[in-house]
Image: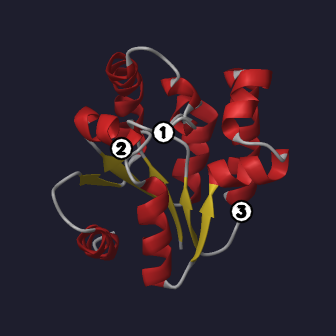
């Protein structure tokens, strides 16, 4: 079983992915961390020095690699769905869980975060809304399961995901 976690930045993909993997007894892979490991630098550096296009090429290579791994949970970067090739690969390679989150929640979670290159702007909310308009339809297009944000614990979210996986 290969499970991909998709969604916008600060939706909880890495946190939920780790907990889901643990609860299912699977390995966990974070594509952003894998990119950083292979590059030897953080994603902000890649964006600053190489630009977003080169970051997306790195992201595509990492997705191709992790899509061949055995049973695991893979959290992805928020923009991984921008590439049609990536969306097709995700669809062909496993179950896709979309973590849907409100803009307000993203703003709260990224308030003091300096590590997100796309949010190094004056108006974070405007940027998040633009990203949502561009990406939400793509998340919805490929998701097998959509988990909507509600006030609840991570463990409750994991229980919902496990129940939904059981329905697939």
* In front: label 2 or label 3: 2
Residue 95 image offset from top left, x and y in percent: 46, 61
The colour scheme used to paint the residues is secondary structure
Q: Position of residue 75 (x, y in %)?
A: 53, 56
Disc 1 versus disc 3: distance between alpha carbons?
32 Å
Mark found first going from the N terminus, 1 or 3: 3
Q: Residue at x 58, y 28 (%)?
A: 117
Quadrant for the C terminus in the image: bottom left
Q: Which residue is mark 3?
A: 68
Is residue 19 depicted above or below 90 in this figure? Answer: below
The reply, left or right, for residue 86 in relation to residue 68 is left
Residue pointed to by mark 2:
109
**Residue situated furthest front in the rendering:** 112
Crowding near the residue tagged with mark 3, few <14, some 14–19, many ≥20 C-alpha atoms within 10 Å: few
Mark pair 1, 2: CA separation: 8 Å
Is 117 situated left or right of 167 in this image? right
- Please, is residue 78 above or below residue 4 in the view? above
Judging by the rendered image, the residue that carries numbered circle 1 is 113
Q: Are marks 1 and 2 in contact (CB under 8 Å)?
A: yes
- Look at the numbered disc 1 and give the secondary structure of its residue: loop
Residue 145 on image: x %, y %? 32, 56
The residue lying toward the viewer, choosing from 115 and 98, is 115
Relative to 22, 27 lies left or right: right
- Is the residue under label 3 in contact with that under label 2 (CB below 8 Å)? no
Say if 68 sits above or below 79 in the image.
below
Which mark is drawn over residue 146? none
């Amino acid at each position: 079983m290969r499970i991909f976690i998709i969604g916008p930045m600060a939706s909880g993909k890495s946190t939920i992915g780790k907990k889901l993997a643990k609860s299912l007894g699977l390995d966990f892979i974070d594509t952003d961390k894998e990119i950083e490991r292979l590059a030897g630098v953080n994603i902000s550096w890649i964006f600053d020095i190489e630009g977003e296009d080169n970051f997306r090429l790195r992201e595509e290579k990492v997705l191709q690699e992790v899509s061949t791994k055995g049973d695991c949970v893979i959290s992805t970067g928020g923009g991984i769905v921008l590439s049609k090739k990536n969306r097709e690969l995700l669809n062909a390679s496993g179950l896709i869980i979309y973590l849907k989150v409100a803009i307000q929640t993203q703003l709260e979670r990224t308030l003091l975060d300096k590590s997100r290159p796309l949010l190094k702007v004056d108006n974070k909310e405007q940027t998040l809304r633009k990203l949502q308009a561009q990406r939400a339809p793509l998340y919805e297009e490929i998701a097998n399961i959509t988990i909507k944000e509600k006030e609840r614990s991570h463990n409750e979210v994991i229980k919902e995901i496990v129940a939904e996986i059981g329905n697939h």
